[in-house]
Image (cartoon, helix red, strand yellow):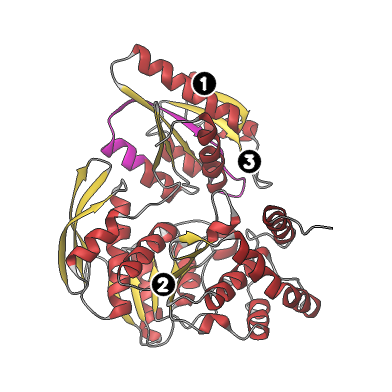
Amino acid sequence: MSEPSEIEQLAQIESALFKRWPESRIEPTLDRITALLDALGSPQLSYPTIHLAGTNGKTTTSRMIDQLLANLGYRVGRYTSPHLESFTERISIKGEPITPTRMIATYKDIELYLDLIDSRQPHPISFFEAMTALAFVAFAEYPVDVGVIEAGMGGQWDATNVLASQVAVMTPIGFDHMEYLGDTLTKIAQTKSGIFKPESNVVMAAQPAEAAKVLMAQAAKLSAIVFREGIEFSVKSRALAVGGQLLCLQGLYGEIDDIYLPLYGQHQANNAAVALAAVEAFTSVALDKELVQDAFSKVASPGRCEVIYKEPTVIIDAAHNPHGAAAIVKTINSEFDFELVVGVVAVLADKDVAGILAELATCLDYIVISQSSSTRALPAAALAEIAGKYFKAEQIEVISDLSAALTFAVEKVSLANQVNEGVSAVLVTGSVVTAGVARAKLRQLGGGK
């Protein structure tokens, strides 16, 4: 009897992982992940790490840090979440998702340990804990020089918070996952500041005052060295450019200008400043100007204001909270000149749906309400009812099937482009799941970038 193919084995692993406790649910303990990693020989301590937390911008900032380190000659392991299309995207080695062969081998290495810890804990290992262990083991097995690790939710009790990180990065803090992290920015910041380590470096993006106060207090308590956006580093200037923007960044060791970043939005410029400061804090040296320019020119951020299709223009953004929605709305309104913007929106039920829609209403001329395949998806009918508070009835179309909704929106915008002189566009947003489905669907349609 022949062995299952790699594709079949990968599907079996994915199925086994997704049967575990979902990552949208957390319990305030590191007992399970600590026990698992102890049994595996603490692989996460075998390489230096940069640890990121925050509400928005973590994945893109991680990608920027990865590219800067790669240009410096480091072999980088990057762990991010959630994924757009394949769970292997979460574990990156040398800028590419882990190969099926390596994922299968790594899972086989830890499978028995998962069962062992399951049998010894009140609750079995969760999906996110298992993925985190897989990443840490893969980075040790296929050795990396440095790990860039994104926290999943919160910080203090996040499964990634078993690191002895040299640098902790805090991206902007806003409201999300409030059922677990708290209903004020002070409480959320307190939980997220749990990633700070004694006498380490802390790189902070610009924060709301109440969050900044908590973060600074925690850093001082741990005798950490703090680098703050707007004080120790900053975006000195930015200008729109074809396909992105041109930046001048104030790093920890001086200015670097003429940086082309092929991403849109002020928030991406801020992410770039944070990434540069994080790598400078990690290396403790000034980076060569041409190296920095080359690194940022190579950065991609799938599903984040990504122009995935051009005739007509379709932009995908994984914004899943009001802070993220505000960022994409600001970018669309200030950096594009669309005559008509049609939104395809599908959100998860546990999000601040009203807050997201309130932001989108300042950008969208027409909204196609839909529903993703996630078990956490808000039904389209319920989303439409909330949307009625922010959009007129004639602005709303309800199409539950997300693929059909995408097709409808693309056809509507194509027709608008044929009869109008201006350029119209589709914006697909609401969740990472929505963004992932849209990317796959648009590839089927052909064209794209």
The secondary structure type at the circle numbered 3 is loop
Would you name the residue on which mark 1 appears? 393
| Along the line of sight, the residue nearer the viewer: 34 or 296 | 296
- What are the residue bounds of the magenta stretch? 329-352
Quadrant in which the N terminus appears: bottom right
Indicate yes or no whether the magenta region holds residue 350. Answer: yes
In the picture, the quarter occupied by the C terminus is top left
Residue ID at (64%, 85%): 38
Q: Nearer the viewer, mark 1 or mark 2?
A: 2
Q: In the rendered structure, which amino acid carries the disc numbered 3?
A: Leu
Residue 209 visible within the image: yes
Q: Are marks 3 and 2 in contact (CB under 8 Å)?
A: no
In-front residue for pair 93/412: 93
Q: On the picture, is 390 further left or further right than 280?
A: right
Q: Nearer the viewer, mark 3 or mark 1?
A: 3
Give the spatial CA distance, label 3 vs label 2.
41 Å
Q: Position of residue 352 (x, y in %)?
A: 53, 47
Residue holding disc 2? 75
Q: Badge 3 is on which residue?
A: 378
Amino acid under disc 2:
Arg
Residue 177 visible: no
Q: Is residue 433 magenta?
A: no
339, above or below 439, in the image? above
